Image (tube, rainbow, N blue to C red):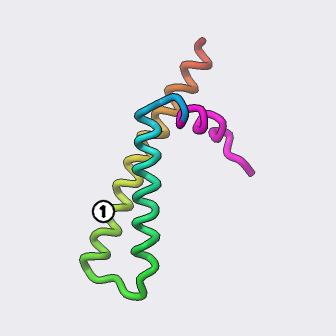
Amino acid sequence: MPNINDGLREELLETDDEFRRLHEEHQDYKRRLSELKQKSFLSPADEFDAKKIKLHKLKLKDRMEEIIRSHRQTRVSA
């Protein structure tokens, strides 16, 4: 089932440079985390990197959600 925000996300990916940059960074971190999870054993350094990547992903996602909320509010008040 598609997310209600999917249409707005797609629009922002096309029109908002910051949102597009954040999305690309988020996808990169997602790929890197997936690569780490493919390992059969995570060293302490790998575990630290995974935690750091998860934190960065969360910050990026939070900022993207802020942008979505802001655009939605702008549409409602317009």
The picture places residue 20, in percent across and down from the top left corner, at: 46, 39
Task: Indicate whether residue 37 is drawn in magenta.
Answer: no
**Secondary structure of the residue carrying numbered label 1:** helix
User: Which residue, as the protein is rendered here, is positioned at the far bottom?
Assistant: 40
Q: Quadrant of residue 14?
A: top right
Q: Read off the residue under disc 1.
A: 52
Query: Magenta region: which residues?
Result: 1-13
The one nearer the camera, 41 or 77, is 41
- Looking at numbered disc 1 in the image, what kind of residue is underneath it? Lys
The answer to whether 76 is drawn above or below residue 29 in the figure is above
Residue 68 horizontal side relative to residue 44, left or right: right
On the image, the x and y values in percent for residue 54 come to 38, 61
Image quarter in which the C terminus is found: top right
Hey, which residue is sitting farthest left in the picture?
45
Judging depth in this view, the residue of 72 and 40 nearest the camera is 40
Q: Up-down: is 44 above or below 69?
A: below
